[in-house]
């Protein structure tokens, strides 16, 4: 079976894969049958909250996790001593990994975005000028991705940072 897709094809429905898919309006291929989250929580700092706001899920996550931490300590597993103590900003807080994944997958992304049980065999550059890449899946499906090229050139000099 062959499928045409206009945009990017992302492998992996983890936090980064889902956030990238949301930002780039992409398809996500996940080899598992459903979303999986390992670990209990993840600390979201100020700049990450700004990105989550742009992605449209920050308010939902703040409602699910209303009490921000003031500080926390990282401790070594082998020696038991403190590695570092962090002081947090007012907007920083810890959220459950599952809540973050579910918010990305169900609240923000269209339902057909994530293709579960999709084991990628190979990705190659397409020989056709119509497509940019071909992704072959274990079940024989070939996804031909086509990227739009909206390239504009600026005559102004770019700032150096």
Image (spheres, grey):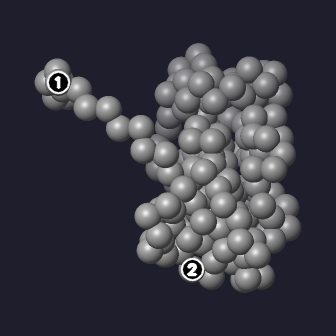
**Closer mark to the observer between disc 2 and disc 1:** 1
Disc sitting over residue 122 in the figure: 2
Name, please, the residue furthest toward the top. Answer: 90
Q: Is residue 70 above or below residue 81?
A: above
Question: Where does residue 57 sit, x and y in percent of width and height?
Answer: 72, 28
Q: Residue at x 60, y 51 (%)?
A: 6
Question: Where does residue 25 sit, x and y in percent of width and height?
Answer: 63, 42
Q: Which residue is mark 1?
A: 155
Q: Is residue 109 left or right of residue 111?
A: left
Quarter of the image for the N terminus: give it.
bottom right
Residue 120 in view of the camera: no
Q: For marks 2 and 1, give the CA distance.
A: 40 Å
Dividing the picture into quadrants, the one containing residue 108 is top right
Disc sitting over residue 143 in the figure: none
Circle nearer the N terminus (2, 1): 2
Q: Residue at x 35, y 38 (%)?
A: 151
Disc 1 element? loop
Q: Is residue 149 left or right of residue 135?
A: left
């Amino acid at each position: 079976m062959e499928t045409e897709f206009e945009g990017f094809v992302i492998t992996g429905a983890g936090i980064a894969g889902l956030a990238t898919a949301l930002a780039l309006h992409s398809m996500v291929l996940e080899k598992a049958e459903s979303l999986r989250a390992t670990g209990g929580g993840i600390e979201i700092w100020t700049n990450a909250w700004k990105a989550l706001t742009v992605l449209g899920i920050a308010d939902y996550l703040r409602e699910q996790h209303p009490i921000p931490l003031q500080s926390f300590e990282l401790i070594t597993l082998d020696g038991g001593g403190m590695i570092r103590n962090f002081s947090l900003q007012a907007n920083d807080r810890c959220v459950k990994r599952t809540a973050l994944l579910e918010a990305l997958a169900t609240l923000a992304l269209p339902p057909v975005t994530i293709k579960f049980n999709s084991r990628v065999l190979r990705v190659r550059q397409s020989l056709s000028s119509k497509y940019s890449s071909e992704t072959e899946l274990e079940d024989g499906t070939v996804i031909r991705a086509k990227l739009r090229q909206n390239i504009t050139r600026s005559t102004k000099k770019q700032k150096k940072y």
